[in-house]
Amino acid sequence: MTRVAAIDCGTNSVRLLIADIVPGPDGGTLTDVERRMEIVRLGEGVDETGRLSPAALERTFTAMRGYAELIERHGSETGEGPIKTRVVATSATRDAGNRGDFVSGVVDIFGVVPEVISGDEEAELSFTGATRELAELRPARPYLVVDIGGGSTEFVLGSSAVQAARSIDIGCVRMTERHLRDGDPPSPEQISNAVADIDAALAEVRRTVPVDEARTLVGLAGSVTTVSGIAMDLPEYDSDRIHLSRITATQVHEVTRRLLHATRAERARIGVMHPGRVDVIGAGALILDRIMREYGFGAVVVSERDILDGIAWSLV
């Protein structure tokens, strides 16, 4: 058994997974020791300014300091000293002109240099994390794994390994800041502009990823899991029920319509809604809805396992 710590710093959230991993011929097992998520909105304004703001950096570093304390505590439990840790940063940090400020802050907190990974690396880690537990469902292959983040969305086609991948700059934070930031709820014109932007990106993905070969759509990350929870009418967020749930295209469309026509106050009252997703969930749901419409998927399998799990597996 190996205890590892994985940190995923995205555009909207910073997440921690401390896990015990036992490799094996059947793929091995990953057991959660600690799994945390904080909405820090690191990418706030990056699409417009090209820089990480001081306030966003401080919110992120505050969450990370708490994570570092957890890693130290759980590492001491093994009696083997510090546990192997990997910090990965994605879309917002890739796009920022001052990403050196982020790197130096992370080194101070964790003692490791964060890896500002490419979109292709992000896609591979997401695919690994998402597909290790799908065998029990016996879904048709190949899969199209879609990871809807804050700044970008990763599209990965594969069966047991990645066949093709593409990262494209549509994400729930980016689309909200570009198109849906004014209005409560957004106007039909704003929604129409967002749809045009998303559809253009999906056409670009189709040029490099043969999405029509996919037989099962697998959706990852907070926008997708939140849509699932709303579709199932859960009174509160329930990771066990959401993980490996199957949501139809009709359900996704209805939830998207509801979110885009709701006021901020109405969205905040939804039982499964994390406070940090209230402002961006409409855009996230719209991205999922357009993917299913444009690529012809009748349902999506929702996974709570994603890039964070892929990072953890990479450490062994």
Image (cartoon, helix red, strand yellow):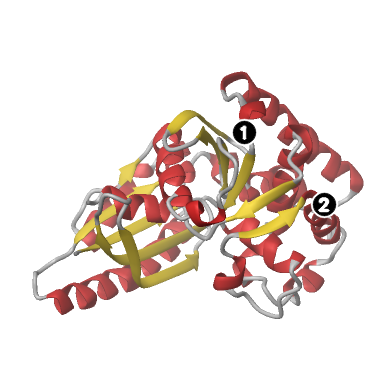
Residue at image point 55% right, 35% down: 142
Residue 73 vs 220, above or below: the answer is: below
Q: Quadrant of residue 234?
A: bottom right
**Residue 97 location in percent, x, y?**
42, 37
**Residue 143 location in percent, x, y?**
56, 39
Residue at image point 68% right, 68% down: 229
Q: Please say whether residue 32 is visible from this viewpoint.
A: yes
Q: Amino acid at mark 1?
A: Ala
**Residue 119 location in percent, x, y?**
45, 35
Mark 2 nearby-residue class (10 Å; few <14, some 14–19, many ≥20): many
Q: Nearer the viewer, residue 11 or 98?
A: 11
Residue at the right extreme?
188
Q: Quadrant of residue 193?
A: top right
Horizontal side of residue 102 vs 13, given as left or right: left
- Does the residue at mark 2 contact the one at mark 1 (Cβ under 8 Å)? no
The residue to which callout 1 is attached is 214
Question: What number is the disc on residue 11?
Answer: none
> What is the C-alpha distance between the residues marked 2 and 1?
21 Å
Residue 21 vs 168, above or below: the answer is: below
Question: What number is the disc on residue 253?
Answer: 2
Residue at image point 33% right, 49% down: 101
Q: Amino acid at mark 2?
A: His
Mark 1 nearby-residue class (10 Å; few <14, some 14–19, many ≥20): many
Q: Pick the quarter of the image with the N terminus.
A: bottom left
Of tags 2 and 1, the one toward the viewer is: 1
